């Protein structure tokens, strides 16, 4: 259930509600909900900290006739999705509760593989608003928000201080100016400016979407129509293209995924780095990081002010083929409830969906990046509600890669991408 470097279809980002054609009742034979009770199986991600197992054990002790068994899905997002899809296609009751990445909500709901959650099952007002939206399809809540988060900017506090810079950048111009000043200092000589994730994979979709949003644009509008050839969207793409041209982004970063960028920052090769919250703990390790105690965390910058990140996350849904759906619903309400989320939050550093955790003094003492993460999530866009997400993401990767590698000018890449996305939206 980790949300550290989400691979394949697991980490992405657009701000849209894409129109869906003929998907709402694709399986008329799908079962309706039931009130069955008994033991349940929860299909989730790898429990790296063993915290979830402990929380599940407590539930099972209190519910001896409704014990929970955890099944870990593959860590790779595409493989995890494939395993769930295969299970649903044969209408298997092997899983009662399934962990869905936010980008899978529409597909699983539209195909009637998961059921809408009853009103009042969870306190919707307690969640980070954008995280709550990732669990919805056509206005109904199908998956309760569990883990969440958005991209943040890691920056070298020590190098900025040496250059006389007191605060992290809030705009792209400030970021470039800060790098120029840092690189003129003895300590900043030879240090690259900035990097995110630009390899031809899901991370590029995330970084492109964030750039578009941070320039005031949107990849799709509220009606589901692509808007990638607007002046604002082109400005976002141009930020990435120009970054490689003028050296703001080092040439070698063209293949970076999350871990390559993290290592570059952690080894002292970057002034600024866009990544997820998981990097904080690793970069803070005194034995394994050259920047421990020397960096800070801020929201990502944008064209004219703070940027708009994309929301990642894992949510919990009830399988339409479960025979014990009442127990499954109760377990979901329990695991995303305030008491358990507070316990979970104190035990590990994955960002959770409960809004109160981000202002809790105890939590902030444990994880000092939380205020910056919350500030970023307040401006973040919910992830897509789209059945054909993988095709959308592939199209983005293809045309954005052509632009950042210089094979197409920005205007041509934007126009070609507009046509590709319009075809997928039909």
Image: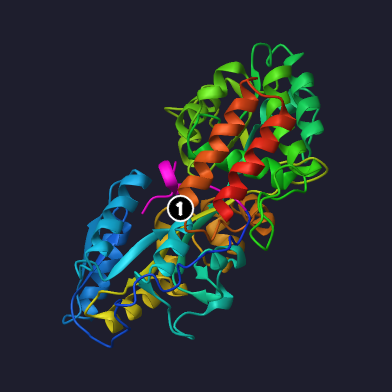
Instruction: Tell me the quarter of the picture where residue 242 sits.
Output: top right
**Residue 284 x %, y %:** 50, 36
- Compared to residue 93, the image places residue 180 above or below, namely above
**Residue 168 x %, y %:** 74, 37
Exactly how many numbered labels are in the figure?
Answer: 1
Query: How busy is the neighbourhood of tag 1: few (under 14 within 10 Å), some, or many (20 plus)?
Result: many
| Foreground of the two, 13 or 165 | 13
Name the quadrant of the C terminus.
Answer: bottom right
**Residue 374 x %, y %:** 63, 56
- Compared to residue 338, the image places residue 48 above or below, namely above
Q: Residue at x 30, y 76 (%)?
A: 30
Name the quadrant of the N terminus.
Answer: bottom left
Label 1: which residue? 350
Q: Residue at x 77, y 34 (%)?
A: 172
**Residue 8 x %, y %:** 41, 42
Magenta: main secondary structure: loop
Q: Judge left or right: residue 301 versus residue 84.
A: right
Q: Judge left or right: residue 207 versus residue 257.
A: right
Q: Residue at x 45, y 31 (%)?
A: 259
Q: Judge left or right: residue 376 versus residue 388.
A: right
- Compared to residue 43, the image places residue 291 above or below, namely above
Instruction: Examine the structure image and report whether residue 6 is included in the region drawn in magenta.
Output: yes
Instruction: Examine the structure image and report whether residue 142 is included in the region drawn in magenta.
Output: no
| Foreground of the two, 78 or 386 | 386
User: Which range is magenta?
Assistant: 1-14
Which secondary structure lies at badge 1? loop
């Amino acid at each position: 259930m980790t949300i550290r470097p989400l691979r394949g279809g697991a980490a992405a980002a657009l701000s849209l509600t894409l129109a869906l054609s003929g998907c709402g009742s694709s399986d008329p034979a799908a079962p309706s909900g039931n009130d069955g009770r008994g033991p349940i199986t929860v299909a989730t991600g790898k429990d790296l900290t063993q915290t979830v197992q402990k929380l599940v054990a407590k539930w099972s002790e209190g519910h001896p006739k409704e014990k929970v068994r955890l099944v870990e899905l593959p860590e790779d997002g595409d493989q995890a999705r494939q395993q769930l899809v295969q299970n649903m296609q044969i209408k298997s009751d092997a899983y009662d509760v399934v962990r869905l990445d936010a980008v899978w909500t529409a597909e699983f709901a539209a195909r009637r593989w998961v059921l809408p959650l009853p009103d009042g099952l969870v306190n919707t007002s307690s969640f980070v608003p954008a995280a709550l939206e990732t669990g919805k399809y056509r206005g109904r809540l199908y998956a309760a928000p569990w883990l969440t988060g958005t991209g943040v900017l890691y920056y070298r506090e020590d190098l900025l201080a040496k250059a006389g810079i007191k605060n992290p950048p809030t705009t792209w111009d400030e970021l470039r100016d800060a790098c120029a000043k840092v690189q003129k200092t003895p300590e900043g000589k030879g240090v690259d400016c900035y990097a995110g994730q630009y390899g031809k994979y899901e991370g590029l979709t995330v970084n492109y979407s964030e750039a578009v949003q941070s320039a005031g644009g949107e990849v799709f509008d509220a009606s589901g129509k692509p808007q990638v050839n607007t002046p604002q969207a082109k400005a976002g793409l141009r930020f990435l293209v120009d970054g490689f041209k003028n050296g703001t982004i080092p040439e070698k970063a063209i293949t970076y995924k999350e871990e390559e960028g993290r290592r570059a920052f952690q080894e002292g090769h970057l002034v600024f780095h866009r990544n997820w919250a998981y990097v904080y703990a690793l970069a803070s390790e005194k034995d394994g990081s050259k920047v421990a105690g020397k960096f800070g965390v801020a929201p990502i910058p944008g064209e004219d002010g703070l940027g708009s990140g994309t929301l990642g996350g894992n949510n919990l849904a009830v399988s339409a083929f479960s025979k014990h759906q009442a127990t499954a619903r109760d377990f979901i309400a329990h695991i995303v409830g305030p008491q358990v989320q507070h316990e979970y939050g104190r035990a590990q550093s994955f960002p959770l969906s409960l809004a109160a955790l981000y202002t809790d003094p105890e939590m902030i003492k444990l994880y000092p990046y939380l205020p910056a993460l919350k500030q970023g999530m307040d401006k973040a866009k919910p992830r897509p509600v789209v059945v054909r997400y993988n095709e959308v993401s592939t199209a983005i990767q293809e045309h954005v890669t052509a632009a950042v590698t210089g094979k197409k000018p920005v205007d041509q890449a934007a126009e070609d991408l507009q046509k590709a996305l319009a075809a997928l939206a039909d």
